[in-house]
Image (cartoon, helix red, strand yellow):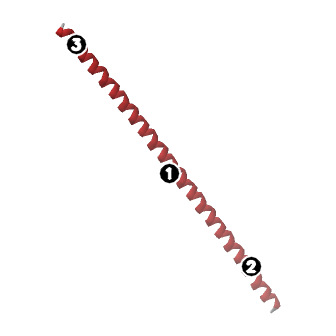
């Protein structure tokens, strides 16, 4: 009977250790998933920022081109008047 009680204790201890290991593994997996999500969010934010910068650059280029067209157009009109 003593052996059986000892066996039960050992089994319970092993089960507790296994449960603790499982819990630790779950926590590690959750941390890894959170980290991956954070990394993905950061990458998305960086991509959005890059796209916004590109759009701003394109708008600036278009504005510059429009300004050049207007100046050319004014010059032509002035020349025609002369």
Residue most extreme to the left: 81
Q: How far apart are marks 2 and 1 (CA)?
A: 42 Å
Q: Name the residue under label 1.
A: 41
User: Are discs 2 and 1 less than 8 Å apart at CB?
Assistant: no
**Residue at (75, 85) in percent of width and height:** 8
Relative side of 19 to 41, left or right: right
Across and down, in percent, residue 14 comes to: 73, 76
Q: How crowded is mark 3: few (under 14 residues within 10 Å), some or many (20 or more)?
A: few
- Decide which of 61, 25 is in the foreground and name it: 61
The tag earlier along the polypeptide, 2 or 3, is 2
Across and down, in percent, residue 46 comes to: 49, 43
**Residue at (60, 60) in percent of width and height:** 31
Number of labels in the image equals 3
Q: Distance between the residues labelled 2 and 3?
A: 94 Å
Q: Mark 3 points at which residue?
A: 76
Residue mark closest to the camera, 2 vs 1: 1
Secondary structure category for the residue under label 1: helix
**Residue at (54, 53) in percent of width and height:** 38
Across and down, in percent, residue 49 comes to: 46, 42
Residue mark closest to the camera, 1 vs 3: 3
Q: Name the residue under label 2.
A: 13
Q: Is residue 45 above or below residue 35?
A: above
Q: Is residue 2 above or below residue 20?
A: below
Across and down, in percent, residue 41 comes to: 50, 51
The tag earlier along the polypeptide, 1 or 3, is 1
Residue most extreme to the right: 2
Please identify the quarter of the rendering in which residue 61 is found. top left
């Amino acid at each position: 009977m003593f052996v059986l009680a000892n066996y039960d204790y050992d089994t319970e201890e092993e089960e507790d250790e296994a449960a603790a290991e499982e819990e630790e593994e779950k926590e590690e997996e959750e941390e890894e998933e959170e980290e991956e999500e954070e990394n993905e969010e950061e990458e998305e934010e960086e991509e959005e920022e890059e796209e916004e910068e590109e759009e701003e650059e394109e708008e600036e280029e278009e504005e510059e081109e429009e300004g050049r067209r207007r100046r050319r157009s004014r010059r032509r009109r002035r020349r025609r008047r002369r």
